[in-house]
Image (spheres, grey):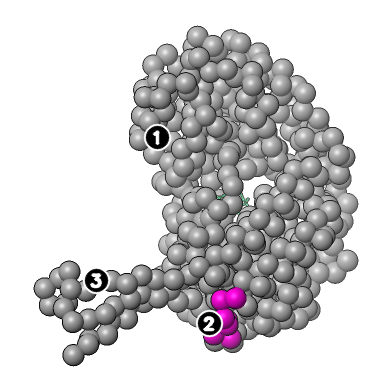
C-alpha cells in the first residue's frame, strides 16, 4: 500500500516514500509519503485558503460534519481498531477502546460546535463605562498546526482536529511517523462528511523538518502539540508569538493509603501501570503504598501482573504487546538495571523478547533513579512505602512533571488535603492517575505542559476572544 499526502482535499504524491513496519512482527505495512518543505508549505497554503470558508460556515454545519465523522468511525470500528493495532502494536481490545473514545471525542466536538458563545459585559461597573452595551464573541484563529504522538494515534488526533473544526479553524496535521495511517483514515472521513477542501490537511515526514516549517510559518496561528517534553520545549522556544498548547509526558504517581481495600481495585491499578505497554502519558509509574499494607499489596500486584497475557496485538486475549521501538525496549531495560544497581529490588519481569518487554515491577527505587524521576514510557513500575501521608504527598510532588495523580484513601481529610497539595493538572481521588474521559479538562503543569484539552477547554484555546462595545448615545 502506498500512502500519499492529503492536501487540499486530494491525495498528493511526493518524491520520497518511507517503508512503515509493524512493530510486533516487523512486516511492512505501507510506503508512507515523506513530505518535503515544499509539500508542507503547500499544505499551509491550502489551509490558509480554506480559512474564510470555515470561519463563515454555520455552527450547525460544522456540528453535522463532526457528527458524521463519528458515525463513519462507528461503522468502521473494527477496521479502525485493526489499523491502530497494526501500526502501533496496541493490543486489539485496547485499540477498540481507543476507537470508542475517538467516536466520543468527535461526538463531544459536534455538540460543542453548537455551544460556542461569549458573554455580556456590564461596562457600567467601571466609572467611564456607562452608556454602553458590550459583549464578547469567540472567533476561530485560522490555521492550526496539530502535531501528534504515536500512542493514541486516533484519539489524540481527535482531541486536536475535533475542537479545531468545531471552532471553524483549518488544520495542518502532522501525525507521528510510526502511526500515520490512522490520521489519513480520519482525513478521508472528514472528506466524505463534506468538510471543505483545504480545511484538513495531513502531512507525514520527519518531525523536525515538517515541524520546523509549521512552527516558523506566520500563517500558522497556533501549534497544538502532544508528545515528549524535549520536542515541546523546542516548539515553545521557536514558535514566536503563536499560541502554543503543549500536552507532554509525566511519571504519574499513585498513593495507596492504609485501610484501602486494594483487592477490589488491583486489576484496575495493574491496568493503569501496563496498559499499552506503559506507553500512556498518565501510566502509573510510581506507587507509594502505606507500610502497614505494603507486603500484601506487592504480592497481590505481582500476582495480578502475572495474569497479563503477553503476545500478538491482534490476538483477542493479548493485554501487552510490543513496544514502539527496539531502542525504547533497550532504554527501559538499562534504566531498570541502573535502578537495581542503586539498590532497587526487581520482583517481577525485566526480560524482553524481541520488542516485547515483560511487565516489570521494582521495589524501593530511589526517587533519583531514571525509572522514577524521568518518564519511563514502558511497562515498568516501582513501588515504595510510606508511613506519613504528608511524606507520600511530598514524594509525588518531588517531580519535574505534573500531569495527573491518584490517591486511594478512606479518610476524607486526607483526600481533600491531597486535592489541595498535589501539584498536577488533575487529582483522582479513589482512582488511578490513568483515568481520563474525553470531555474533562486535561493537561499538565511543570514539564507536563500547559494548556488544556477536553473539547470545551481546547475550544477556548483554539478561539480568540473579541470584545464588541456599543456606545448608546
Ligand atoms: P515525540 O517523539 O515528541 O513525537 C511527537 C510528535 O512530534 C511526532 O509527530 C513527531 O514526529 C513530532 N516531532 C518530533 N520532532 C519534532 C520537532 N523537532 N518539531 C516538531 N515536531 C516534532 O513523542 P512520541 O514518542 O510520539 O510520544 C510519546 C510522548 O508523548 C511521551 O512523552 C508521552 O507522555 C507524550 N504524550 C502526552 C500526552 C498528553 O496528553 N499529555 C498524551 C500522549 C502522549 P516523528 O514521529 O516524525 O518524530
Q: Residue at x 39, y 39 (%)?
A: 423
Q: Position of residue 308 (x, y in %)?
A: 77, 28
Q: Is residue 17 above or below residue 247?
A: below
Position in image of residue 328 (x %, y %): 68, 41
* Other residues around mark 2 within 10 Å, as few (<14) / some (14–19) / many (≥20): some
Question: Picture quarter containing residue 129?
Answer: bottom left
Confirm whether the magenta stretch covers residue 50. no
Residue annotated with mark 2: 55
The span from disc 3 to disc 2 (Cα, nearest Å) is 28 Å
Q: Which residue is mark 3?
A: 122
| Ligand 1 shown in quarter | bottom right
Compute the Cα span from label 1 to label 2.
40 Å
Asked whether, in this view, residue 69 is left or right of residue 239, the answer is right
Q: Where are the magenta residues, as a range?
A: 53-60
Local packing at callout 1 (Cα closer than 10 Å; few below 14, some 14-19, many 20+) is some
Q: Percent position (x, y) of residue 233?
A: 47, 56
- Residue lying at the far bottom of the rendered structure: 473
Residue where numbered disc 1 is placed: 419
Q: 345 or 125: nearer the eye?
A: 125
Placement of the N terminus among the 4 image quadrants:
bottom right
Question: Could you say which is closer to the camera, residue 353 or residue 449?
Answer: 449
**Residue 232 visible somewhere in the drawing:** no
Q: Are marks 1 and 2 in contact (CB under 8 Å)?
A: no
Left-right relation of 357 to 311: left
Dot 3 or dot 2: first in sequence order is 2
Tag 2, which secondary structure? helix
Magenta span main SS:
helix
Q: Quadrant of the C terminus?
A: bottom left
Q: Quadrant of residue 271?
A: top right
Q: Is residue 58 magenta?
A: yes
Amino acid at each position: 500500500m502506498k500512502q500519499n499526502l492529503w492536501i487540499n482535499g486530494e491525495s498528493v504524491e511526493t518524491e520520497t516514500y518511507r517503508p512503515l513496519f509493524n512493530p510486533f512482527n516487523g512486516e511492512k505495512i505501507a510506503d508512507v509519503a515523506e513530505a518535503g518543505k515544499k509539500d508542507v508549505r503547500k499544505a499551509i497554503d491550502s489551509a490558509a485558503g480554506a480559512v474564510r470558508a470555515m470561519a463563515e460556515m454555520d455552527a450547525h454545519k460544522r456540528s453535522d460534519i463532526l457528527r458524521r465523522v463519528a458515525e463513519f468511525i462507528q461503522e468502521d470500528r473494527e477496521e479502525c481498531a485493526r489499523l491502530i493495532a497494526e501500526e502501533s502494536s496496541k493490543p486489539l481490545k485496547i485499540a477498540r477502546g481507543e476507537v470508542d473514545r475517538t467516536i466520543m471525542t468527535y461526538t463531544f466536538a459536534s455538540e460543542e460546535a453548537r455551544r460556542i458563545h461569549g458573554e455580556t459585559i456590564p461596562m457600567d461597573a467601571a466609572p467611564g463605562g456607562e452608556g454602553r452595551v458590550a459583549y464578547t464573541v469567540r472567533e476561530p484563529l485560522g490555521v492550526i498546526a496539530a502535531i501528534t504522538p504515536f500512542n493514541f494515534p486516533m484519539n489524540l488526533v481527535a482531541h486536536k482536529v475535533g475542537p479545531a473544526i468545531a471552532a471553524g479553524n483549518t488544520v495542518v496535521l502532522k501525525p507521528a511517523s510510526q502511526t500515520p495511517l490512522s490520521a489519513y483514515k480520519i482525513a478521508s472521513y472528514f472528506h466524505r462528511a463534506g468538510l471543505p477542501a483545504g480545511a484538513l490537511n495531513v502531512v507525514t515526514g520527519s518531525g523536525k523538518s515538517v515541524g520546523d516549517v509549521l512552527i516558523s510559518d506566520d500563517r500558522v496561528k497556533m501549534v497544538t502539540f502532544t508528545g515528549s517534553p524535549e520536542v515541546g520545549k523546542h516548539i515553545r522556544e521557536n514558535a514566536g508569538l503563536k499560541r502554543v498548547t503543549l500536552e507532554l509526558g509525566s511519571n504519574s504517581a499513585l498513593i495507596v493509603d492504609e485501610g484501602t481495600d486494594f483487592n477490589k481495585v488491583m486489576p484496575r491499578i495493574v491496568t493503569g501501570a501496563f496498559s499499552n505497554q506503559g506507553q500512556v502519558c498518565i501510566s502509573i509509574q510510581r506507587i507509594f503504598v502505606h507500610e502497614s499494607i505494603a507486603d500484601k499489596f506487592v504480592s497481590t500486584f505481582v500476582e495480578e501482573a502475572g495474569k497479563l497475557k503477553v503476545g500478538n496485538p491482534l490476538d483477542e486475549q493479548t493485554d501487552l504487546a510490543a513496544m514502539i521501538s527496539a531502542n525504547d525496549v533497550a532504554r527501559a531495560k538499562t534504566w531498570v538495571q541502573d535502578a537495581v544497581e542503586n539498590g532497587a529490588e526487581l520482583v517481577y519481569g525485566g526480560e524482553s523478547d524481541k520488542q516485547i518487554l515483560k511487565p516489570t515491577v521494582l521495589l524501593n527505587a530511589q526517587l533519583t533513579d531514571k525509572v522514577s524521576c524521568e518518564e519511563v514510557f514502558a511497562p515498568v513500575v516501582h513501588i515504595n512505602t510510606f508511613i506519613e501521608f504528608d511524606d507520600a504527598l511530598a514524594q509525588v510532588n518531588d517531580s519535574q512533571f505534573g500531569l495527573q495523580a491518584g490517591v486511594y484513601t478512606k479518610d476524607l481529610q486526607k483526600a481533600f488535603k491531597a486535592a489541595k497539595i498535589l501539584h498536577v493538572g488533575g487529582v483522582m481521588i479513589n482512582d488511578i492517575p490513568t483515568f481520563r474521559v474525553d470531555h474533562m479538562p486535561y493537561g499538565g503543569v511543570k514539564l507536563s505542559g500547559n494548556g488544556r484539552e477536553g473539547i470545551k477547554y481546547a475550544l477556548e484555546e483554539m478561539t480568540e476572544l473579541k470584545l464588541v462595545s456599543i456606545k448608546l448615545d
